[in-house]
Amino acid sequence: MSPLPQVRGDRLIRALGKIGFVELRRTGSHAVLVHADGRTAIVAVHGSRPLPPGTLHAVLTVEQLKELL
């Protein structure tokens, strides 16, 4: 079992908002988020399907993600 919780795209967007990311635009099923320091994150929002663990690792560490959720 993965140490990461299963997270949907909309929930990850809310978590990233807590650390300063702002949704810039949404094109189809993908949201583009930007941070004031220049970082960007593209998050797929596919209904109730959870994001793959590799995608979550690319955005946040396990500790950061668990803290924000």
Image (spheres, helix red, strand yellow):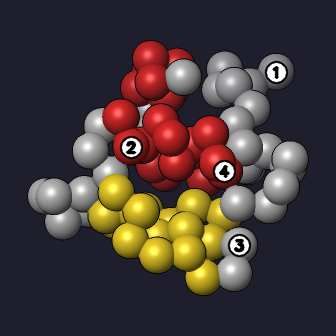
The 10 Å Cα crowd at callout 2, few under 14, some 14 to 19, many 20 or more, is some
- Specify whether 65 is left or right of 46: left
Name which residue lies at 54% across and 22% down: 69
- Specify whether 36 is left or right of 58: left
Residue reaching furthest to the left: 37
Identify which amino acid the numbered label 3 is placed on: Ser
Quarter of image, res 5: top right
Secondary structure under the numbered disc 3 in the rendered image = loop
Identify which amino acid the numbered label 1 is placed on: Met
Secondary structure under the numbered disc 4 in the rendered image = helix
- The earlier-in-sequence mark between 1 and 3 is 1
Q: Position of residue 12 (x, y in %)?
A: 57, 43
**In the displayed structure, would residue 60 be above or below residue 29?**
above
- The earlier-in-sequence mark between 2 and 3 is 2
Q: Position of residue 39 (x, y in %)?
A: 26, 62
Secondary structure under the numbered disc 1 in the rendered image = loop
Which residue has dot 1 on it?
1
Secondary structure under the numbered disc 2 in the rendered image = helix
State the mark number for residue 17.
2
- The earlier-in-sequence mark between 2 and 4 is 4
Measure the C-alpha gap from mark 2 to mark 4.
12 Å
Which residue has dot 4 on it?
9
